[in-house]
Amino acid sequence: MNLILLGPPGAGKGTQATALCERHGLLHLSTGDMLRAAVARGDELGRKAKEIMDAGKLMPDSLMVAMIEQRISQPDCKAGFVLDGFPRTVPQAEALDMMLAEKGLKLHAIIELCVDEAVLLDRIRKRIEESGDAKRTDDSEETLKKRLEVYREQTAPILPYYKAQGKLAQVDGMQDIDNVSRQIENILNSAGGRPPRAGVAPGP
Ligand code: AMP
């Protein structure tokens, strides 16, 4: 089973992806984590990623597509994966469709975590308070606001792209973690036919 979790920064994609992978034995593929690993290594990619991430902007599509293509070609991805943070632009979504088709792989579901921006700001403030020295360098209110703007402008257009394919399902990401997990499981359990819909939040 191959899944995509979509939603703005702070929507809970990472938390839900981790839980989903534990429940279903899938691999969690987070492009943000891959980039943070590069930043920690301090190589050329890491230096570039740090600058872009701290500014709340997006890395170039070609680089991110190559990173994911390389990763999903590894044998461990055969068990299935959850994409978290990719795709983030329509060209990335198109490139993903092409690479999956070439590999004979399918997306089982694309799940959008729908949340309120005011709640996101609160969540990020909390994440900053709780993380102390381990805080992500892109966890600041200013960066979050920029990331939300980038999400609206560059990532949200993915939603109609997947909706047109009849693959987009939405959950109410304002609920607590267990409730969001239950909504996601309902989507995964629902048999084909109509596009699944578990949440209450309206579509884009
Ligand atoms: P995340 O942990 O998914 O919120 O990602 C943190 C940052 O990494 C983002 O704000 C972007 O700067 C960068 N990033 C992660 N994934 C992508 C992607 N698919 N395309 C472009 N930039 C990305």
Image (tube, rainbow, N blue to C red):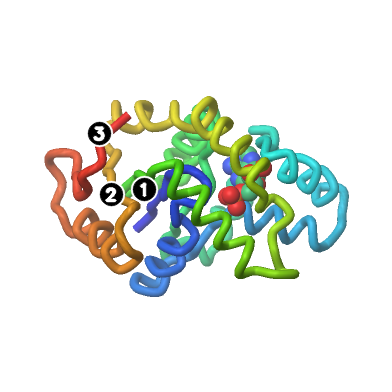
Nearer to us of marks 2 and 3 is: 2
Q: Is residue 77 left or right of residue 139?
A: left
Is residue 201 in sight in this rendering? Answer: yes
| Label 1 environment density (alpha carbons within 10 Å; few <14, some 14–19, many ≥20) | many
The foreground one among 127 and 180 is 127
The quadrant of the rendering that contains the C terminus is top left
The quadrant of the rendering that contains the N terminus is bottom left
Q: Position of residue 16 (x, y in %)?
A: 41, 62
Considering only order in the chain, which callout, 1 or 2, is on the residue closer to the N terminus? 1
Residue name at image x 30 percent, y 64 percent: 181
Residue 166, disc: 3
Q: Position of residue 14 (x, y in %)?
A: 49, 59
Residue name at image x 60 percent, y 69 percent: 130
Q: Amino acid at mark 2?
A: Val
Q: Position of residue 97 (x, y in %)?
A: 44, 36
**Label 3 close to label 1 by CB (< 8 Å):** no
Residue on which the image places disc 1: 113
**Label 2 close to label 1 by CB (< 8 Å):** yes
Q: Secondary structure at mark 1?
A: strand
Q: Amino acid at mark 3?
A: Gly
The image quarter containing residue 6 is top left
Q: CA distance from mark 2 to mark 3?
A: 15 Å
Residue on which the image places disc 2: 171
Q: CA distance from mark 3 to mark 1?
A: 17 Å
Q: CA distance from mark 2 to mark 1?
A: 5 Å
| Label 2 environment density (alpha carbons within 10 Å; few <14, some 14–19, many ≥20) | many
The foreground one among 80 and 158 is 158
